[in-house]
């Protein structure tokens, strides 16, 4: 199953996260490094992740109209505010 690492941009829904995954690639003609991002809706049964966390998500069966990913683990907690 495909897995992706991304940052949680929203945790306002119950048991659902919005995870933004960025990918970088070299443009074929311009030879410039381009960053593209995409948002994925992921299922978080226990509510372990919060906004700003770095998380690992795995593709799963469709859980709702938009949710096709589940949270595997929280890799890094959000940065503490100083």
Image (tube, helix red, strand yellow):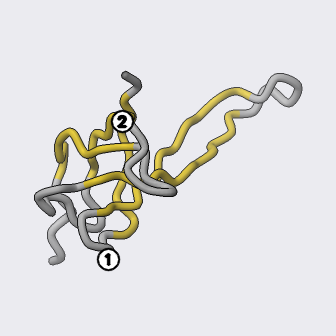
Q: Which mark is residue 23?
A: none
Are circles 2 and 1 on residues that touch, CB within 8 Å? no
Q: Identify the residue at image location x=56%, y=49%.
A: 38
Location of residue 21 in the rendering, given as x and y in whole percent from the top left corner: 47, 46
Q: Earlier in the sequence, mark 2 or mark 1?
A: 1
Q: On the rendered structure, is 39 left or right of 44?
A: right
Looking at the rendering, in which quadrant would you find the C terminus? bottom left
The residue to which callout 2 is attached is 60
Looking at the rendering, in which quadrant would you find the N terminus? top left
Q: On the rendered structure, is 70 left or right of 26?
A: left
Q: Identify the residue at image location x=17%, y=56%.
A: 45
Query: Badge 1, how many Cα within 10 Å: few under 14, some, many 20+?
Result: few
Q: Identify the residue at image location x=18%, y=76%.
A: 81
Depicted 4 relative to depicted 1: above or below: below
Location of residue 58 in the rendering, given as x and y in whole percent from the top left corner: 33, 34
Circle count: 2
Location of residue 34 in the rendering, given as x and y in whole percent from the top left corner: 68, 39
Location of residue 14 in the rendering, given as x and y in whole percent from the top left corner: 26, 72
Depicted 80 relative to depicted 18: above or below: below
Depicted 79 relative to depicted 26: above or below: below
**Depth check, front residue: 61 or 3:** 61
In the displayed orientation, state which residue is furthest to the right.
29
Q: Nearer the viewer, mark 2 or mark 1?
A: 2
Q: Identify the residue at image location x=82%, y=23%.
A: 28
Q: Secondary structure at mark 2?
A: loop
The residue to which callout 1 is attached is 12
**Depth check, front residue: 22 or 34:** 22
Q: What is the spatial separation of the Cα atoms under label 2 and label 1, in whole angstroms?
A: 21 Å
Query: Badge 2, how many Cα within 10 Å: few under 14, some, many 20+?
Result: some
**Depth check, front residue: 32 or 13:** 13
Which image quarter: residue 9? bottom left
Which image quarter: residue 53? bottom left
């Amino acid at each position: 199953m495909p897995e992706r690492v991304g940052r949680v941009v929203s945790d306002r829904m119950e048991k659902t996260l919005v995870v933004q995954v960025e990918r970088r690639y070299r443009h074929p003609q311009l030879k410039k490094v381009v960053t593209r991002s995409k948002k994925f809706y992921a299922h978080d049964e226990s509510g372990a992740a919060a906004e700003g966390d770095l998380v690992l998500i795995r593709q799963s069966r469709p859980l709702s109209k938009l949710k096709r990913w589940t949270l595997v683990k929280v890799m890094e907690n959000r940065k503490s505010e100083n």
